[in-house]
Amino acid sequence: MKKQFLAGLIALLLIHACTPMNQEHKYTNALIHESSPYLLQHAHNPVNWQPWGDPALAEAQKEDKLVIISIGYAACHWCHVMEHESFEDSLIAANMNTNFVSIKVDREERPDIDQIYMDAAQLMTGRGGWPLNIIALPNGKPVFAGTYFPRDNWEKVLNHFSKIYQSEPEKLREHADKVTEGISNNEMPTFNETAGDYSSDTAIQIAQNLLAGIDLELGGKNEAPKFPMPTVYEYLMAESYYRNNDTVNQAIRTTLDHMANGGIYDHLGGGFARYSVDATWTVPHFEKMLYDNAQLISLYSHAYQHYGDDTYLQTVEETIAFCNRELKDASGGYYSSLDADSDGEEGKFYVWQASEIDSLLGEKAQIFKTYYGITPKGNFEGKNILERKTSVRTLSVDYGRTETEIQRIIDDCKATLITARDQRIRPGLDDKILTSWNALMVTALTDAYFATGKQAYKTQALETGNFLLTQQIFDANQINRNFNNGKSTIHGFLDDYAFTILAFVKLYEATFDEAWLLQAQEMKTFVNAHFLDPKSKMYYYTSDTDQKLIARKMELSDNVIPSSNSAMAHALILLGQYFYQEEDIQHAAQMIANSQANFSEYPFYYSNWARLYTLLGETHYEVAIVGDEAAAKRDALAQHYIPNKILLGGKTEGTLALLAGKHSEGATFLYVCQNKSCQLPTQTVDQALKQIKK
């Protein structure tokens, strides 16, 4: 259990990253044939990089060479540094080419490989990060792990292991076997036969355990760096709904307010950076990830429903606008990320000198500088990251102008600065499209549609959902993970399936088109056939039909994204309710029971499991809406934050069992049901809301 806790903690602290930018074409290696932007960035290194695959490992075994497995991703900083210092160096490259087989891995395309070798790094060194550099035997078993190395240190590592493999190969093999055994045993679940029934007292205690680690003054966890961790606050918001605890509300609102006001949020272009390096949410690590922004759209949509704060609505709308403007592909899919660097400098695209603001904004500058805390000294290396430091109402009083005038001045200033910023060199774009992250975006757009009623968000959700359906799903129910320039080459992992199932359930709720539910059900069947461990009732991250790695892992802890197992448990609960499949609900209950010790003791790192524990334990409502006005009544009901309900219906009864016999000619009725037993039908949303008791 402690090992699992440490894995969750370390995963949050992985802050080294990569943004290779090689313009020379003197060399070309095998990565030139790949579709990943990260791999293509290394295609002209003098290192003879190869993509992960059987040919590279077969070459290593044939030539009896150690393997370098270098893992990173495109949207960050420290891989770029190591590439420039080491992988572009001809002497280092000659050493690597002579004595090793070198493999480059995009961790976002191949999280299965990253997961295994990150476990190795944590077991061998107690820490991890990217770039992640592994030295392994020809069979892929690791003997050494590290992150960023300056050139001279990397050369020493290469020379040491090249020499020791020649002189003492058995010593390395023994070490590799022990590390591989540790990887296989790390974070593996057991079947829990003793978990008790749901208890509200237990649920309250779990929430208290989590709150003990929350910074109630500044929001987020009581430490730095601070990650948004949307799953934590989705769990707490559900707790607020069930029990309306003041401290829970304080934790949610303080965190969401400080993030939306802080430097982690782009106040000109919208969207959130990956994390804040400090405890005040002031200085971000400037990369912008699709998975963060998708989940934060959902979180702020729910917060707007729950608390009615217009700042949350503004945050939703601006973040969606950012995603559509900067990350949307013509295919309907969304790209993965924007780099932290531009013009070789971290954050350069986003920061401002006070003198620039004065020059660009003229007489309006003072109001804008007061609003966003801009000073000559700055808050980041002599420059300013925008932070919202006051309110329009306060500025109205201080400057003797109406709130409307103040807001107009701020909006005009933002437009001027956006125009100026657009002339700068832009951050690099990772334009690969990943299925699981796009599924999160479908869910986000649907949540925003429910919260705001804006049809455009529903249209966009359907567009991306149809992209996944037509481009990423094949043979009826199998999923591919990646898409770029028309290529979709990597079979999906558990998160691709779980998040897509959840997204398709959301699309059903938004449309009452049963085709989305039926597709989700088909994918669930495939997952059960190819990912399930029948002993523990948990799921492996990889399919049994794909290439075998040195270990087959399960992803259990929730971090910046919910774990694929907790997402799959959620999918089982929902599909079990829609299709009257009690075995699915019982399966999910067993998965939750298997995880109960972890989410009880370490709820910050198992918060989605804690949310599911409460979801399954509290009263749950099935709301059936049937008749010509079903869509309008659904949308009116869905504007309310009700985490313990599902929606089903349509103009006619459809095929779902709960809808049978509920159509009345010329009228639209809402049926609030619990466990397949329905209260008296009503024609008004207000009455249905009264029947739903917290």
Image: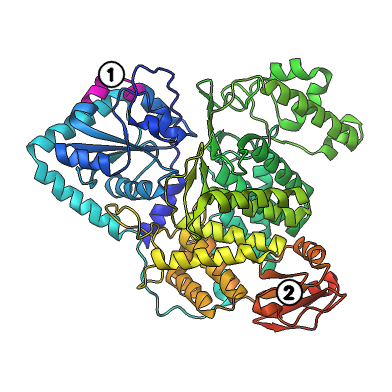
Q: Residue furthest front?
A: 475
Q: Which residue is mark 2?
A: 624
Quarter of the image for residue 406 reads: top right
Magenta stretch prevailing secondary structure = helix
Q: Amino acid at mark 1?
A: Ser
> Where the C terminus falls, by quadrant?
bottom right
Which is nearer the eye, 162 or 500? Answer: 500
Q: Residues within 10 Å of mark 1 (few under 14, many from 20)?
A: few
Q: Which residues are magenta?
A: 85-95
Q: Which mark is residue 90?
A: 1
- Secondary structure at numbered mark 2: strand
Q: Is residue 184 left or right of residue 349?
A: left
Looking at the rendered image, the disc whose residue lies closer to the viewer, 2 or 1, is 2
User: Is residue 89 a member of the stretch shown in magenta?
Assistant: yes
Which is nearer the eye, 587 or 151? Answer: 587
> Where the N terminus falls, by quadrant?
bottom left
Q: Position of residue 24 (x, y in %)?
A: 40, 17
